[in-house]
Image: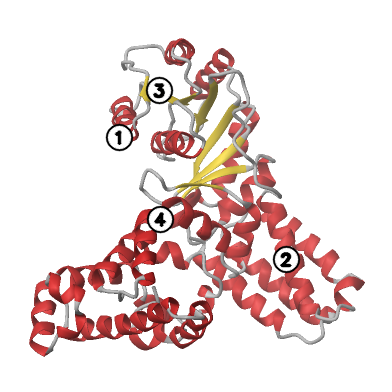
Amino acid sequence: MLENLTQRFSQIVKNLSGQGRLTEANIQEALREVRVALLEADVALSVVKEFIERLRIQALGEKVLTSISPGQALIKIVNDELIAILGKAYAELDLSAQPPAIILLAGLQGSGKTTTAAKLAHLIKTRLKKTVLVTSCDIYRPAAIEQLKTLAQQIDVEFYPNAPDQNPIKIAQNATDQAKRQTIDVVIIDTAGRLHIDDEMMDEIKQIHTIVNPIETLFVVDSMTGQDAAKTAKAFNDALPLTGVILTKLDGDTRGGAALSVFSITGKPIKFVGVGEKIDALEPFHPDRMASRILGMGDIVTLVEEVQRKADQEKAEKIAKKFKKGKGFDFEDFLDQLEQMNKLGGIGGIMSKLPGIASMPQAVKSQVNDKMLVHMKAIVQSMTRQERRFPDVINGSRRQRIARGSGTEVQEVNRLLKQFKMMQKMFKKISQKGGMLNMMRQMGQLKGMIGKTGFPPM
């Protein structure tokens, strides 16, 4: 996610941090690098100009030039300005209307509206604990209605049935009426998209908006279209009273032009971002956290929230009790940890939120990926139950058999066993007196393991 932009900004931050004293000359050089980074990220030119001008005014002020640590002072200004163009503050979904609260989704064809409707319904149901009904007014795209119906069944929310020969405005009205009768909390209406903005589409969605009077009108846009996403959002915002934006496919966007342009051009906050294909891959958008990630400082808060929400607490408590009784960490536990990592978005999802990843050598980052997790899981699953519980019995012939069974090389099996032994030592120290202090020392020893073994500390 935004890898190119993060790498460029991480280098800029590194250069600034090393400056003992800032002058007009090196500030101008830093601003030039920021400008190039933003233009390469496909950020709208008007946004880039305004951003650089605000930075220049503050950076050349006495506060920075006379600061004890001017490099850090300038980095804070860059961080604050990034937050400002990303939306200033987290914008919550407004569901305060008399039930049902109606959410209308608008956007071009191919932006991911239908999938987003289901993801949003799942989020509202699981996190906000509200009942949801979804319906599709897209009578033009083949199988659009069936697609949403199938997704609604998967996440177990209500679906208002309709047919391609029905009037879209009537569908929206009938779905709202049904939600009132069933005392459903939230209605999500998926509207038709086109390959381009046209008057017919706008007239239809305006009529739907007038009839249902939604509390939230969200524009769904593909983030990979760059600054074109912001231009399209502005066109919709001129036609509809938008309350926010949902950026889809942000996990595949290496540039970040849309994320950095939408708020400045439309004045409407980004409320959610799509970060994957899974039904739970829709996250609330926090400008401060995104700014931190862009600057290579990670997003630990979001990672902790995901662990709390997605990690299997029962298994965690089971492992904790096991350590308390003095029992060792075995490959059965290791396999559970791999499953937990998958739930958190795999290695890629976790690493994208860790500080300093952007500055990690590319050769190392290329080794640490989700394909590696698949190999590790295959190796463990190729072991017998006895081998998983008592790894010390794994000799040379067993390693060859495990490698053949997992479709890997013996060297990969050896690396995993070496990494596992390090983990065993770490967990043993946790279970002993002064465990946390010992664990911190052990983590210090593990710090260099990524580059040496090809596997990350778990």
> Vertically, is 199 above or below 374?
above
For marks 2 and 1 on the same chain, the one whose residue lies earlier in the sequence: 2
Q: Does the CB distance between marks 1 and 3 fall below 8 Å? A: no
* Residue at numbered disc 4: 311
Find residue 13 and report its horizontal and vertical position in percent. 66, 76
Between the C-alphas of marks 4 and 1, the distance is: 21 Å
User: Image quadrant of residue 410?
Assistant: bottom left
> Vertically, is 421 above or below 264?
below
Between the C-alphas of marks 2 and 1, the distance is: 43 Å
Between the C-alphas of marks 3 and 4, the distance is: 32 Å
Farthest residue to the front: give it: 325
* Residue at numbered disc 3: 135
Find residue 380 and report its horizontal and vertical position in percent. 20, 71
Between the C-alphas of marks 3 and 2, the distance is: 43 Å
Mark 2 burial class by Cα count in 10 Å: few <14, some 14-19, many 20+:
many
Disc 1 marks a residue whose amino acid type is Gln
* Residue at numbered disc 1: 154
| Secondary structure of residue under mark 1 | helix
Disc 3 marks a residue whose amino acid type is Thr
Q: Which residue is drawn at 51% across and 64% down?
A: 353
Mark 4 burial class by Cα count in 10 Å: few <14, some 14-19, many 20+:
some
* Residue at numbered disc 2: 78
User: Image quadrant of residue 332?
Assistant: bottom left
| Secondary structure of residue under mark 2 | helix
Question: Which-is-in-front pick, marks 4 and 1?
Answer: 4
Question: Which-is-in-front pick, marks 3 and 4?
Answer: 4
| Secondary structure of residue under mark 4 | loop
